[in-house]
Image (spheres, coloured by chain):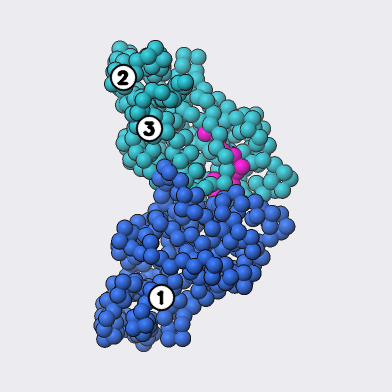
Chain colours: A cyan, B blue
Amino acid sequence: MKIARTNHEVREAVANARMQGACIGFVPTMGFLHEGHLSLIRVARENGATFIVVSIFVNPTQFGPNEDFSRYPRDEERDRALLESEKTDLLFLPRVELMYPRGATTRIDAGAVARPLEGVRRPGHFEGVATVVAKLFNIVQPDLAAFGRKDAQQCAVIDRMTYDLDLPLQLVFGETVREHDGLAMSSRNSFLSAEERGKAPVLHRALRAGEEAITHGIHDVAEIEKLMHRVVAEEGGVEADYLAVVDPMTFEAPADFDRHVLVVGAVRIGRTRLIDNIRIFRW
Amino acid sequence: MKIARTNHEVREAVANARMQGACIGFVPTMGFLHEGHLSLIRVARENGATFIVVSIFVNPTQFGPNEDFSRYPRDEERDRALLESEKTDLLFLPRVELMYPRGATTRIDAGAVARPLEGVRRPGHFEGVATVVAKLFNIVQPDLAAFGRKDAQQCAVIDRMTYDLDLPLQLVFGETVREHDGLAMSSRNSFLSAEERGKAPVLHRALRAGEEAITHGIHDVAEIEKLMHRVVAEEGGVEADYLAVVDPMTFEAPADFDRHVLVVGAVRIGRTRLIDNIRIFRW
């Protein structure tokens, strides 16, 4: 696995691979890798990528002032070993000063889809995400890029931006990888104490309860959301941030239940904030 | 000259040219071409471009609700003949519905440099410019793109965006091309009546007066601006929108006169708004 630390090193390695006929697959991450990230490498390969670029960059501009940027977990050595084991071709490790030189001011706003839910709770978050992802796309210039569906609204924001700006690449999305008890894999799970870890699966359980209600014909958004809140409340020690039924395109309440809907939630357990979602397909 | 009307047609033609070793030069325009536009084709060639792509797209999102979008001059047949005579390789003529399909919401904001002067007078203008230019860059994927210095703040906005988003291309800027009496060439000059056309060179004369004052050692911004306003007032029938001395990087008042400064102005003559500028190099 080659390591690149500058735009030039990335572009040179990618151009060489492309000259040899490679299809460039890109998996942007914030590191502290888990099975969810590694599955995205496989998703990229399944979609035709023959040269895998992974970036690790804890992007400061997508963290709010009271969020967990400084304590976000980092373990470069372990990450490198995991990426080697997945036969990653190129690891891009940009420094903050490379990504945001003094005077950088340009921001990308994906618009309406970035407003509700996470958009309300984390002002500026999706602008930070959209901008850094566009930068990484422009540096790596991949043929395809893979993102995990655990961050459902982030996927929608990146999809919107990629389409609206005519970015010349294909997006592929990987299913959420879960622990045996349903907890969605997340680098932030490492923040949980043993007791908190015991409570964490309640988020997925609440979403599953919402899913079941919908598939059993309950199509009253308020009722479904109340039901999900009840599941979280019964656990105790877990604070629901939001538990919602939304249209997966707009992240607003669905106009009807004739098409796909998404149940999506965020909870706080101690100092840790976790998110998850389930897509519900309707015919 | 090949004509492309879809992203796919552009990308196919550009990919073919690149496979044959071409260096792709791109000149985005709003059409109604004049010598200023055509000079940019030559500037692109001088900088190494061997395959010239020109786009003509009157971009609605960079016009305010009370601006001249609907009456902006158009003459596709004449434009095509001019581009043929410059041996343009590919002309991209996207329709509005192609560039802005229903639901498109993503916007790019270049930040501080887009705020003063034109930014104040034309809210949303530079967001419209930055977004459409990024889209065109992503569709054409040129090696270099040429812009005219007549639109000085636009050049700064695009420069800022290109740098901040790591867009993989080189920008080149062409000097303002002028009529014999100093009037900067502009598609909007066609709006002027004979009488208005007679008054129009006063904008350049005012900027020249500002330039002369600066080169003669007058370094009081207010005094220089007053002088430029006096020149415009003396002409009569021309309304100064702004006449300013600015730092060419920030478009704010210069901190000092030890480096380059820009005198920049906008005037209204009847219903027509004209802009111009002069760069002043200081050692």
Q: Is residue B80 above or below residue A95?
A: below
Dot 1: few (<14), some (14–19), or many (≥20) neighbours within 10 Å? some
Give x and y (percent) for residue A177. 52, 22
Relative side of B233 to A109, left or right: left
In this figure, which residue is indicated by the disc labeled 3? A251
The residue shown at (64%, 55%) is B14
Kindly state the secondary structure of the residue where label 3 is placed. loop
Q: Quadrant of residue B17?
A: bottom right
Residue B130 point in image, percent of width and height? 44, 56
Distance in Å between CA atoms under marks 1 and 2: 60 Å
Q: Judge whether residue B266 is colored magenta.
A: no
- Both labels 3 and 2 in a single chain: yes
Residue nearer the viewer, A68 or A133? A133
Query: Which mark is in front, 3 or 2?
Result: 2
Are marks 1 and 2 in one subunit?
no
Q: Which residue is mark 1?
A: B189
Indicate left or right for A89 with A155 as reference.
right
Residue sitting at 38 percent across and 23 percent down?
A257
Q: Which mark is residue B52?
A: none
3 or 2: tag closer to the N-terminus: 2
User: Disc 2 marks which residue?
Assistant: A220
**x, y percent for residue B37:** 52, 71
Q: Secondary structure at mark 2?
A: loop
The residue lying toward the viewer, choosing from B87 and A35, is B87
Q: Which residues are magenta?
A: A137-147
